[in-house]
Image (tube, rainbow, N blue to C red):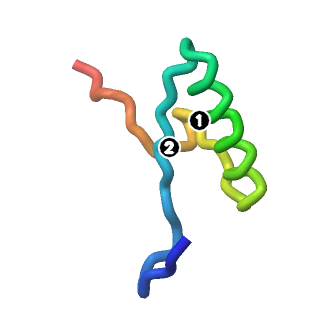
Amino acid sequence: MRTSAGKTSIRVYDYADTRVPVLRAMHNRRLQTYKALGFRRLTADDSGARPPPQA
């Protein structure tokens, strides 16, 4: 990853069509690479997303 002054974190969005076997395999390889690079997967709870306001 290239560095940029003032930035301390990154977010990767990786989309995959897992119904297509070759695309699913490529996605699984990317996930292994992300892990080897020290990335961690976030869940919806980790993302900082807020639930919609109550009416």
Q: Quadrant of the N terminus?
A: bottom right
Which labelled disc corresponds to residue 43? 1
Q: Quadrant of residue 41?
A: top right
Q: Position of residue 48 (x, y in %)?
A: 46, 45
Q: Quick check: marks 1 and 2 in contact, CB under 8 Å?
A: yes
Q: CA distance from mark 1 to mark 2?
A: 6 Å
**Which amino acid, by three-letter code, is at mark 1?**
Thr
Asked whether 45 or 11 is in front, the reply is 11
**Which amino acid, by three-letter code, is at mark 2?**
Ser
Residue shown at 61% from the left, 34% from the top: 27
Q: Quadrant of residue 51?
A: top left
Assign a secondary structure to mark 2.
loop
Q: Quadrant of the C terminus?
A: top left
Residue shown at 55% from the left, 16% from the top: 20
Assign a secondary structure to mark 1.
loop
How many residues crowd mark 2 within 10 Å: few (<14), some (14–19), many (20+)?
few
Relative to 14, is 35 above or below?
below
Q: Which residue is mark 2?
A: 47
- In the current view of this chain or complex, which residue is farthest to the bottom? 5
Q: Position of residue 30 (x, y in %)?
A: 65, 44
Residue shown at 57% from the left, 19% from the top: 18
Asked whether 22 or 36 is in front, the reply is 22
